[in-house]
Amino acid sequence: MDVTHRLAALEHPTRRALYDLIAESTEPMGREAAAGALGLSRSTAAFHLDALATAGLLAVEFRRPGGRRGPGAGRPTKLYTPAAEEISVSVPPRRYELAADLFAGAIAESARTGAGVRDVLRERAAADGRARGERAGTFEAALASVGFTPREEPAGDLVMGNCPFHQLAQAHTELVCELNYSLVRGMAEGAACGRRVVADPGAGRCCVRAEASPERGAGPP
């Protein structure tokens, strides 16, 4: 289930209250305890807790009372805990976890091989982009999967209306622009779209452009 549907599950005030209750609890919580804490009927609590579990926001486990086992131990109790997977949303889209993964991988490989960390970063970003382009099938879909917002200009070129690494780019402009260039170039190659990716910093948008014609434009940054 995607992030949009997960967040939609929290729009209902009762579900949000139950989610907050489970998230703040130090122990897995059952339906009766949750219902009692919020003044709900057990059936109402069960309905909304299961909806949160279906949305991937809560994890479910079963335990018998007092840890007992075997015949006569009683029916297992259904318990809820926050899902392990983190969910984050930003507007416009940001993908700082992707940048962190690429940076960390480049540093680790550089330390292991002795290669220049920026060279390794460009290679890893290009490889990641190629894989995304191949999976997405189209260049535009690959861009959108990372948080770029491609906008077509009259000549057919694509400019990016959003940088998924905006805050990092403010502090480390040259480094992040190299990352963006390599990542987007890899996407174009993976999707076999025929566009040439060039450096083209502009106010209010990302620092790369994907040209409609591969013969035009400047080279990498």
Image: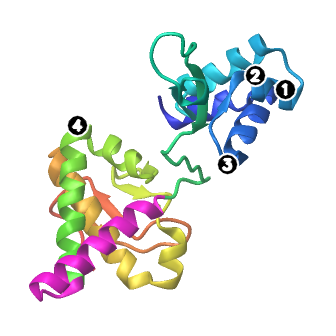
- Kindly identify the residue that appears in the image at 33 percent across and 49 percent down: 156
Tags 3 and 2 in contact by the CB under 8 Å rule?
no
Tags 4 and 3 in contact by the CB under 8 Å rule?
no
**How many callouts does the rendering have?**
4
Tags 2 and 4 in contact by the CB under 8 Å rule?
no
Please determine whether, in this image, residue 124 is positioned above or below residue 162.
below
Residue 196 seen by the camera:
no
Which residue is outermost to the right? Answer: 39
Residue position marked by numbered label 3 in the rendering: 26
Tags 1 and 2 in contact by the CB under 8 Å rule?
yes
Tell me which label, 3 or 2, sits earlier in the chain: 3
Structural distance between the alpha carbons of marks 1 and 4: 50 Å
Tell me which label, 1 or 3, sits earlier in the chain: 3
Amino acid type indicated by mark 3: Thr
- Kindly identify the residue that appears in the image at 50 percent across and 65 percent down: 205
Residue position marked by numbered label 1 in the rendering: 36
Q: Nearer the viewer, residue 209 or 162?
A: 162
> Circle 4 — which element?
loop
Amino acid type indicated by mark 4: Gly
Tags 1 and 4 in contact by the CB under 8 Å rule?
no
Structural distance between the alpha carbons of marks 1 and 2: 6 Å
Q: Where is residue 181 in the image (x, y as percent from the top left)?
A: 29, 69
Please determine whether, in this image, residue 124 is positioned above or below residue 44.
below
The image's mark for residue 32 is 2
Q: Position of residue 142 (x, y in %)?
A: 31, 46
Residue position marked by numbered label 4 in the rendering: 137
Q: Which of marks 4 and 3 is in front?
A: 3
Examine the residues drawn in magenta and state their main secondary structure: helix
Tell me which label, 4 or 3, sits earlier in the chain: 3
Structural distance between the alpha carbons of marks 4 and 3: 44 Å
Q: Give the range drawn in magenta.
A: 95-117
